Image (cartoon, rainbow, N blue to C red):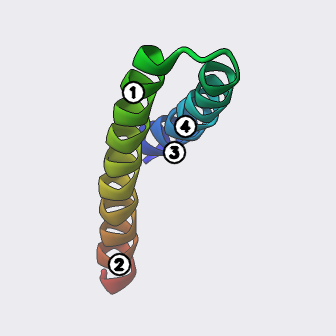
Amino acid sequence: MGKKFALNIFYNLAIILSIFGLVWCYNNAKYLPAGFLVGTTACLFYFKYQLTKDIRKGFKEKDQK
C-alpha cells in the first residue's frame, strides 16, 4: 500500500509541474509544448483517478475482513 501512496504523491507533483509548465508556455507563446503538457496533464489525471479507485477498493476489502 505504501507504493501506491508514493505513486499518488508523484502524480500530484507531476500534475502541479505540468500546470506550471502550461502557464509558462502560455505566457511565452510556446503553443506546441503547451499542447504536449495538456495531454500529459490529462493522462496524469486519468492515472491518478484509476489509482484512487484502486486504493479505495483496497481499503473496502481490508475493512470487510
Sequence-first disc among 2 and 4: 4
Q: Mark 2 points at which residue?
A: 60
Q: Nearer the viewer, residue 29 or 43?
A: 29
Q: What residue type is labelled 1?
A: Gly
Q: Mark 4 points at which residue?
A: 15
Count of numbered circles on the image = 4
Task: Give the image quarter of residue 9.
Answer: top right
Sequence-first disc among 4 and 3: 3
In the image, is residue 24 above or below residue 13? above
Sequence-first disc among 1 and 2: 1
The reply, left or right, for residue 11 in relation to residue 59 is right
Q: Residue furthest front?
A: 29
Q: Distance between the residues labelled 3 and 2?
A: 16 Å
Q: Residue at x 42, y 43 (%)?
A: 4
Q: Mark 1 points at which residue?
A: 35
Q: Which of marks 4 and 3 is in front?
A: 4
Q: What residue type is labelled 2?
A: Lys
Q: Distance between the residues labelled 1 and 3?
A: 29 Å
